[in-house]
Amino acid sequence: MKKRKIYPTALLLFGFVAVVTLSDLVNPVRAFSEMENRELKTTSQFTISRLFKGDFQSQYEKVVADQFVGRDEWITLKSMTESALLKTENNGVIYGKNGALFGKMTSYNQEQLTKNISFLQQFAEKHDNVTFGVIPSGYTYSTDQLPAGSGQINQLPIIADIEESLKDSVQWFDVAGLLAAQESESLYYNTDHHWRGTTAYLAYTALCEQLGLEPVAEEELTLREVEDFYGSYFSKCKKADTKPDTLTFYDLPFEVKATVDGVEKDGWYDAAQLEKRDKYGAFLYGNGGLTVLSKEEQKEDGSKLLLIKDSFSNALAPMFLNNFDEVYIIDLRSYPMGLTKL
């Protein structure tokens, strides 16, 4: 009788797969990852048509990847391995000097940029007094902290081309020039892609001056500081030795009423969110489509400001309540009507 050979390596591999599979079956389903600061894929609806198109398989693979047992620990292990191998980037994040993290940007979509400029021109034709500016990424002002050969593109010539394209349509707000004139090296967070609260105030005062408004004095505001802030870049790369930032923002000297997509909120920021990992998400309660801010004691002129923004302006927009009765804030990523409907 022929004896069957038993291969220890094969048995070990089989046992590992079996344990992981069983663990996945009993592992609680998570809808959100605090560590990655994103929603996780939880289900993939099965249909015959999706099966034959291959869509079901790809979506199911995403569910398995997101719900994999010990996902957070595996991500941390991967990051530690990348660092041990002296790699200078991980998951689209570049490791800079002095603990700074930067988003990798080695190319951009010129076709999409041209379309966006066209949309802006169409919008400006329908509305008066349109002011527009582009905020550069943080590495623009920290090139000395980038590792050699990172290949980051220079955003300033691109922004200059945008300005040239829009010169007959809008009033240009030179954010890039404003920040370049600053001597501070702490304009942006180390672990997040946003600018600091002090930089947001700097932009607010410059924009007020350009619009002929009187900015509120810094001493009339209250600077808030929240420790242990790990931002968007850290959420992507999980670099083990990363030191946390201190989240900063200026609170207003009066009560603020806010509605986000029609839902009333208590103030302009979510205090409970400041206790979580995604602390920046506290400002304006995230990126709602339409947010309306107002204050109890309004001026008699009923002045209003429309601000179309991305998340950089979440800490800046409330400051304009010092100049306007109401501030209407639109984030086109969440606003269903689109730019041409405004």
Image (cartoon, rainbow, N blue to C red):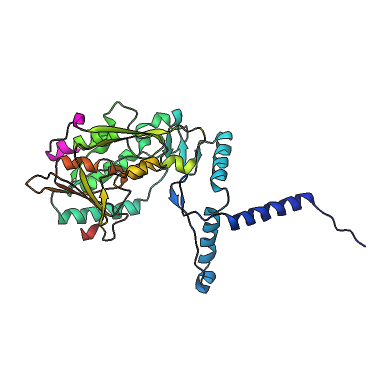
Q: Which quadrant would the N terminus be assigned to in this image?
A: bottom right
- Which residues lie in the magenta part? 207-220
**View extreme (top): residue:** 183
Q: What x and y, as percent, mark residue 309?
A: 27, 48
Q: Position of residue 108 (x, y in %)?
A: 38, 47
Give the camera-side residue of 271 and 157.
Answer: 271
- Horizontal and vertical percent position of residue 189: 37, 35
Residue 214 sits inside the magenta stretch: yes
Determine the residue located farthest toward the left in the rendered image. Answer: 300
Residue drawn at (49%, 41%) of the image: 237
Furthest residue in direction right, as rendered: 1
Q: Quadrant of residue 332?
A: bottom left
Quadrant occupied by the C terminus: bottom left
Quadrant of residue 261 within the rendered picture: bottom left
Residue 289 lies in magenta, yes or no? no
In terms of image quadrants, where is residue 14? bottom right
Is residue 102 toward the left or the right of residue 14 in the image?
A: left
Q: Residue at x 36, y 41 (%)?
A: 274
Q: Is residue 22 above or below residue 283?
A: below
Residue beneath the point at 54% across and 39% down? 79
Residue 104 appears in the picture as rendered: no
Going 39% across and 39% down the picture, which residue do you hit?
192
Q: Is residue 291 left or right of residue 150?
A: left
